[in-house]
């Protein structure tokens, strides 16, 4: 007496008809996940670019202040500065980046 294994029985069972609607929904979900992942990657990349720009501006400002402080009072007077306005002058010369993307964000 030959018995059929459960794996062989599964092969003999008729296959379920394709559910076109379910496949379409799965495709839409997959596309939405890809779009979400791309948007998240773009936001993370943008954050790090903004962070790098801010750190570069801060470093440049600090170097400018150090260079101006290294000058004598006479040299500062020659370029129209005093020791009291070195920081303000450096800040005006190297502004920090603003959040320029605030007006481009939209609600989901």
Image: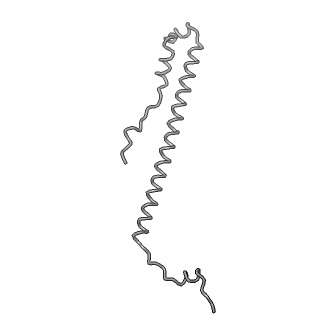
Residue 3 percent location from the top left of the image: 61, 88
Q: Quadrant of the N terminus?
A: bottom right
Q: Residue at x 50, y 36 (%)?
A: 50
Q: Is residue 69 left or right of residue 96?
A: right
Colour mapping? one colour
Kindly indicate the quadrant of the structure image that contains residue 101. top left
Q: Residue at x 51, y 12 (%)?
A: 79
Q: Residue at x 48, y 80 (%)?
A: 15
24 and 52: which one is in front? 24
Residue sitting at the far front: 1
Residue sitting at the far right: 1
Residue sitting at the far top: 74
Kindly indicate the quadrant of the structure image that contains residue 24. bottom left
Residue 14 percent location from the top left of the image: 49, 82
Q: Residue at x 38, y 42 (%)?
A: 105
Question: Exactly how many numbered labels are in the figure?
Answer: 0
2 and 32: which one is in front? 2
Residue 99 percent location from the top left of the image: 43, 34
Q: Is residue 107 left or right of residue 95?
A: left
Residue 84 percent location from the top left of the image: 50, 11
Q: Is residue 72 left or right of residue 36?
A: right
């Amino acid at each position: 007496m030959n018995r059929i294994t459960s794996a062989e029985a599964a092969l003999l069972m008729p296959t379920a008809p394709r559910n076109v609607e379910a496949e379409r929904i799965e495709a839409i979900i997959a596309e939405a996940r890809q779009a979400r992942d791309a948007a998240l990657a773009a936001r993370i990349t943008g954050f790090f670019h903004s962070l790098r720009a801010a750190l570069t501006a801060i470093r440049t400002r600090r170097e400018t202040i150090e260079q101006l402080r290294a000058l004598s009072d006479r040299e500062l007077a020659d370029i129209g500065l005093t020791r009291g306005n070195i920081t303000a002058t450096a800040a005006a010369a190297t502004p920090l980046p603003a959040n320029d993307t605030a007006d481009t964000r939209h609600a989901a």
